[in-house]
């Protein structure tokens, strides 16, 4: 199964992501990844057939590192942040608006705020 994780761009923006460790990539492809788009598409197809989030089919950015291969998904703000927190945990926060300062919020508070303006909710980095 793919591992759902969070990708951080180094500028405070957090994104949903999936990663496959190299041994799993080899098992899926039957060999090492050769860096080609065809290998990427084969992995994306495998992910789509094995319970990965729907955004995987349209992902256009990813990474490789010493641990494996990954895809970067949607930014974790608004309803995407709330759904991530429901499924995986994490701290939610509310951006500052004309009425209130930025602050941490509970999942229940985030849902109420998002009904009015989902762009105010984001997933906080964990310490």
Image (spheres, grey):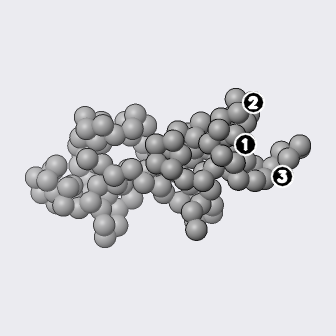
Name the element at disc 1. helix
Residue 5: quadrant of the picture: bottom left
Asked if the residue under mark 1 is in contact with the one under mark 2, i.e. CB atoms within 8 Å, the reply is yes
Q: Is residue 44 left or right of residue 72?
A: left
Residue 36 location in percent, x, y?
26, 53
Task: Return the residue nearer the eye: 119 or 29.
Answer: 119
What residue would you read off at disc 1?
A: 120
User: Which residue is situated farthest in the right direction here?
Assistant: 99
| Residue 34 visible in the snapshot | no
> In the rendered structure, which disc, 2 or 3, sits on the residue that comes first in sequence?
3
Task: Return the residue nearer the eye: 71 or 96.
Answer: 96
Residue 111 location in percent, x, y?
65, 35
User: Which residue is situated farthest in the top direction here?
Assistant: 115
The local crowd at label 1, few if under 14, some if 14 to 19, many if 20 or more residues have their Cα within 10 Å, is some
> Label for residue 101?
3
What residue would you read off at disc 2?
A: 116
Residue drawn where x is 29% and y is 55% of the image: 20
Task: Return the residue nearer the eye: 53 or 124.
Answer: 124
Name above or below for residue 11 compared with residue 108: below
């Amino acid at each position: 199964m793919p591992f759902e994780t969070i990708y951080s761009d180094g500028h405070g923006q957090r994104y949903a992501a999936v990663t496959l460790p190299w041994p799993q990539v080899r098992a899926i492809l039957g060999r090492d990844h050769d860096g080609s788009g065809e290998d990427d598409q084969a992995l994306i197809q495998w992910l789509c057939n094995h319970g990965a989030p729907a955004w995987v089919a349209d992902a256009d950015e990813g990474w490789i590192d010493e641990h494996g291969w990954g895809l970067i998904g949607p930014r974790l703000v608004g309803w995407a942040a709330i759904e991530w927190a429901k499924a995986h945990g994490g701290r939610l926060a509310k951006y500052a608006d004309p009425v209130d300062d930025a602050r941490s919020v509970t999942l229940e508070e985030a849902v109420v705020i998002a009904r009015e303006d989902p762009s105010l909710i984001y997933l906080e980095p964990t310490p």
